[in-house]
Image: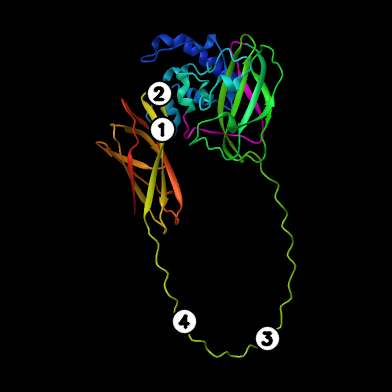
């Protein structure tokens, strides 16, 4: 299969959008992407990645299970994906931390892109610790600089919104002439592993127009360590056996049995974000003082909320009640151990917390 470069793919898609915009049904296009702006395309930003993967099938219900964070973003505001290259905030005057508030970094504090700020199972791009970053700028604005940050170890993008204090600045580039794409080498600190957010500020040169970009990456699998040679074992001489005299038998003492722990479970709910008529939540299930083989959590909603998609559990709903059950890989929990499942939902009017209860199976 011939691999098309991100720039060629973007250019072709932009032409398609410009020609076919009049045929789109139910989607109001804010601006023709070919006429403005740009984004980090490798590793792809959250919004660009959702457009790249699903623009030709954004109504496909399979997205809800295969790519739930993107499904929530498309449901919240499809205009965001069609305008993936407009995540900027004008007039920052270089004061980025004062211009964009905590929790709004991935949207540039723009409500159109609010879904990008919601924690969840965003698709990650596997990367080694050293790799090139590519920013595609179809309008050739140029760049005064790129500032590139990575999240600190311990930050969890699936449960935490992004704050400035979660980031470490790892590179500031010089100027780029207005000739897209802009590519720079990135080196990630070696103590970072797992799912991290690469946060890029692109200070465009044509205006005081900084772009704020969140890309989800997976670290720790990009390089293969050199194996340590296994030493040749040294033969150990066989000792001469020693005759052991027969011991007088000792009476067997029956131990006093230790009371068994309680094989129950508890559940707690946390809401992680709201946008329009949608929201994201998480439930933590914790075993009691004895292991359990499975669990079931009931959620009773006070305001008619509904779960639209769920991960790390299966769910059924009846009226105001939702019952979530473990999957094959996360049902067995050791004593006092925990697991979590998350979901996106819909609401209107009020969005109060549900009453939750856990039953061990």
In this rendering, the label closer to the viewer, 2 or 3 = 2
Q: Which residues are magenta?
A: 118-140
CA separation in Å, label 1 and label 2: 12 Å
Is 168 placed above or below 329 here? above
Disc 1 to disc 2: CB gap under 8 Å: no
Disc 3: CA contacts within 10 A as few (<14), some (14-19) or many (>=20) = few
Find disc 4 in the rendering and name its residue: 253
Q: Quadrant of residue 134?
A: top right
Q: Quadrant of residue 282?
A: top left
Q: Check residue 120 for magenta coloring.
A: yes
Q: Name the main secondary structure of what is drawn in magenta.
A: loop
Find disc 3 in the rendering and name its residue: 242
Q: Nearer the viewer, residue 345 or 176?
A: 345
Q: Check residue 307 for magenta coloring.
A: no
Q: What residue is shown at x 48% (from left), y 36% (from top)?
A: 159
Disc 1: CA contacts within 10 A as few (<14), some (14-19) or many (>=20) = many
- Mark 1 or mark 4: whose residue is earlier in sequence: 4
* Left or right: residue 83 compared with residue 279: right
Find disc 2 in the rendering and name its residue: 76
Disc 4 to disc 2: CB gap under 8 Å: no
The quadrant in which the N terminus is found is top right
CA separation in Å, label 3 and label 4: 29 Å
- Mark 2 or mark 3: whose residue is earlier in sequence: 2
Label of residue 280 in the image: 1
- Residue 107's x, y, as percent? 51, 22
CA separation in Å, label 4 and label 2: 68 Å
């Amino acid at each position: 299969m011939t691999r098309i470069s991100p720039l060629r793919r973007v250019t072709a898609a932009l032409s398609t959008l410009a020609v076919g915009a009049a045929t789109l049904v139910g989607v109001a296009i804010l601006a023709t992407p070919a006429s403005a702006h740009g984004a980090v395309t490798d590793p792809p930003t959250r919004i660009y990645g959702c457009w790249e993967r699903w623009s030709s099938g954004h109504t496909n219900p399979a997205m809800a299970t295969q790519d739930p964070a993107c499904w929530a973003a498309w449901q919240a505001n499809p205009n965001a994906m069609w305008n993936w290259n407009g995540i900027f905030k004008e007039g920052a005057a270089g004061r980025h931390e004062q211009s964009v508030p905590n929790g709004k970094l991935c949207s540039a504090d723009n409500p159109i892109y609010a879904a990008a700020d919601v924690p969840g199972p965003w698709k990650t791009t596997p990367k080694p610790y050293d790799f090139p970053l590519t920013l595609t700028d179809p309008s050739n604005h140029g760049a005064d600089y790129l500032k590139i940050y990575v999240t600190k170890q311990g930050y969890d993008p699936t449960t935490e919104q992004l704050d400035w204090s979660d980031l470490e600045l790892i590179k500031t580039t010089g100027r780029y002439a207005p000739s897209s794409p802009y590519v720079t080498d990135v080196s990630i600190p070696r103590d970072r592993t797992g799912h991290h957010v690469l946060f890029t500020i692109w200070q465009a040169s044509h205006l005081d127009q900084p772009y704020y970009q969140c890309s989800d990456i997976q670290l720790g699998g990009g390089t293969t360590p050199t194996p340590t040679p296994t030493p040749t074992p040294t033969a150990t001489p066989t000792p001469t056996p020693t005759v052991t005299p027969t011991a007088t038998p000792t009476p067997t003492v029956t131990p006093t049995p230790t009371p068994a722990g309680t094989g129950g479970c508890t559940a707690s709910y946390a809401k992680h974000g709201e946008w329009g008529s949608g929201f994201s939540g998480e439930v933590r299930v914790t075993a009691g003082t004895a292991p359990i083989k499975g669990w079931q959590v009931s959620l009773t909603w006070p305001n008619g909320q509904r779960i639209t998609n769920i991960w790390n559990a299966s769910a059924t709903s009846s009226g105001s009640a939702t019952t979530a059950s473990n999957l094959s890989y996360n049902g067995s929990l050791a004593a006092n151990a925990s697991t979590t499942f998350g979901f996106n939902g819909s609401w209107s009017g009020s969005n109060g917390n549900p009453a939750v209860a856990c039953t061990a199976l």
